[in-house]
Image (cartoon, rainbow, N blue to C red):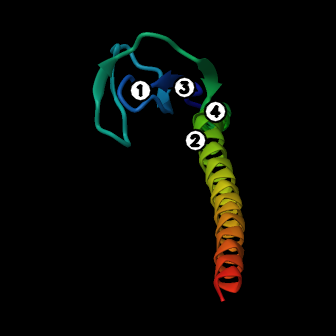
């Protein structure tokens, strides 16, 4: 029976994603998704292939959620700002209508006084 293969969880320096990679004597490895060749600097986990793949999925999911937080808060800020701007525009339109109505009534008063 062959000895079990051990894997490591490595992180790509360019795309910042994690990947499970089999333990080898060489310290060089290539990221499968982006093709970036790099040196082994740090292991984020070691174990069987299945354990490392699960760990990679968890780490990439967490990283994706963290990277979406600033985008979501930015989108919420923009949408809230648009809502406020619409509210200010509507308030401004109402104020302009209120200002125009009294000026019309003053003109009518002038015409009534003139006749």
> Disc 1 or 3, which lies upstream in sequence?
3
Q: Position of residue 17 (x, y in %)?
A: 48, 32
In-image side of 105 versus 42 (left or right): right
In what element is the residue under mark 3?
strand
- 3D distance between C-alphas at marks 1 and 3: 15 Å
In what element is the residue under mark 4?
helix
> Disc 4 or 2, which lies upstream in sequence?
4
Q: Residue at x 64, y 83 (%)?
A: 114
Q: Residue at x 37, y 40 (%)?
A: 32
| CB under 8 Å between discs 4 and 2 | no
Q: Which residue is mark 4?
A: 66
> Is 2 in front, or is 108?
108
Q: Which disc is residue 71 wearing?
A: 2
> Disc 4 or 3, which lies upstream in sequence?
3
- Graded by Cα atoms within 10 Å as few (under 14), some (14 to 19) or many (20 or more), the crowding at tag 3 reads many
Q: How many marks?
A: 4
Q: Quadrant of the C terminus?
A: bottom right
Q: Which residue is mark 3?
A: 7
- Graded by Cα atoms within 10 Å as few (under 14), some (14 to 19) or many (20 or more), the crowding at tag 1 reads many
Q: Residue at x 71, y 78 (%)?
A: 109
- 3D distance between C-alphas at marks 4 and 3: 26 Å
Q: Which residue is mark 1?
A: 12
- Graded by Cα atoms within 10 Å as few (under 14), some (14 to 19) or many (20 or more), the crowding at tag 2 reads few
Taking 54 as reference, is 12 above or below it?
above
In what element is the residue under mark 1?
loop
Foreground tag (2 vs 1) = 2
- 3D distance between C-alphas at marks 4 and 1: 17 Å
In what element is the residue under mark 2?
helix
Q: Position of residue 63 (x, y in %)?
A: 60, 32
Taking 60 as reference, is 104 above or below it?
below
> Disc 4 or 1, which lies upstream in sequence?
1
């Amino acid at each position: 029976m062959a000895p079990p293969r051990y894997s490591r969880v490595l992180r790509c320096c360019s795309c910042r994603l994690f990947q499970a990679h089999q333990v080898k004597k060489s310290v060089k490895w290539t990221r499968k998704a982006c093709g970036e060749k790099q040196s082994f600097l740090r292991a984020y986990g070691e174990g069987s292939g299945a354990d490392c793949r699960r760990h990679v999925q968890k780490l990439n999911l967490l990283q994706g959620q963290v990277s979406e937080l600033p985008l979501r808060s930015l989108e919420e800020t923009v949408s809230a700002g648009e809502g406020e701007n619409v509210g200010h525009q509507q308030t401004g339109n109402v104020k302009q209508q209120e200002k125009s109505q009294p000026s019309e009534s003053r003109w009518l008063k002038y015409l009534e006084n003139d006749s």
